[in-house]
Image (tube, rainbow, N blue to C red):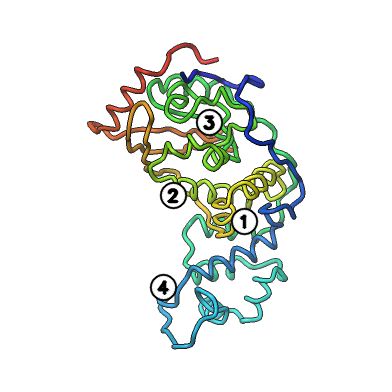
Amino acid sequence: MPRDHRPAGDAPGRPSAAPVRKTDDVSAPGAPAPPRSSLAEFLRASRARVEPGDVGLPDDGRPRRVPGLRREEVAQLANVSVDYVVRLEQGRSTGVSRQVLDALADALVLDDAGRDYLLTVAGPPPRRRGTTAPQAVPAPTLRVLDALGDTPAMILGPCSDVLAWNRMAAALITDFGALPPEHRNMVRLAFLDPAFRSLYGDWSRVAQDCVAALRMEAGRNPDDARVTALVGELSVKDTDFRRWWGDHRVRGSNQRRKQYVHPVAGPMILDVQRFALLERPDLMLVSYTAAADTEAEAALRFLAGWAPRGPVA
């Protein structure tokens, strides 16, 4: 039975399947690249995803050795020289102007999340902050979790670390209190926990969203040892993560509809929304709701009756 828990320190939990790999070495497999390399890799990956027809270019009939646009086509669309595109993709240029970045974003058909990521990794290196320390969740925010009652909700940190949750979140997703604190991470669970994986009817999309969100965080904080360790561990342990990490996709959506196959409540489709906390922008409130008069709403009501009640620890 899941139980309420608010981490105030280490909680008893099940043993890990394997030790967590921790490293500050950015050369570790899958580790976030330094900012200039991140820009180069992102430009190459984004170029490979765009076909000439996507940007109104005619097919000249010449065979393409690699997928996507040629460098000269990107240069034409962005109104820069081919040599400049080459230098950017090789990580040999710095101080790229906002005008050029906007032109490249247009040429590569980037969405809002992609544009934000491009501006982030092309900007000045962020101040080194080392390892992300465990964040204390403010008491008023914990009261919000309680007040949400039968609505599953949790508080996530920058790397999707689960910092606090209500009883319904534990009932819906997993008994976070039974996990070691360092394993309470939504990305890690998505790839390394079989029960968590089986909870999603569309696991592949959910997992790719997790990777894209982590990629965005790595772009904002490339020197964060927590990000480096998590990416390194998952790259070593899971081939899907390693492949999707190499795609360099990013995500900025705050709302997604997800399909769940709950072992007790059955299948349900829930809207997952993320709310940034104004006073603590490093924290995110995540809620799970069902549309009115749907089977999913009935499933959540059933789950609310099944989940144990009691004060939040």
Q: Which residue position is annotated with label 2? A: 205
Which residue shows up at 69% across the image and 62% down it? 37
Which residue shows up at 75% across the image and 46% down it? 128
**Kind of residue at disc 3:** Ile
Distance from label 3 to label 1 (Cα)? 25 Å
Pointer 2 with pointer 1, Cβ within 8 A: no
Please state which of the two labelled residues, at mark 4 or mark 2, is closer to the viewer.
Answer: 2
Q: Which residue position is annotated with label 1? A: 120
Disc 3 on helix, strand or loop?
strand
Please state which of the two labelled residues, at mark 3 or mark 1, is closer to the viewer.
Answer: 3
Disc 4 on helix, strand or loop?
helix
Disc 2 on helix, strand or loop?
helix
Q: Which residue position is annotated with label 4? A: 54
Distance from label 1 to label 4 (Cα)? 25 Å
Pointer 1 with pointer 4, Cβ within 8 A: no
Residue 158 placement, left or right of 223: left
- Give the camera-side residue of 199 and 184: 199
Residue 25 place in picture, x, y as percent: 77, 50
Please state which of the two labelled residues, at mark 2 or mark 3, is closer to the viewer.
Answer: 2
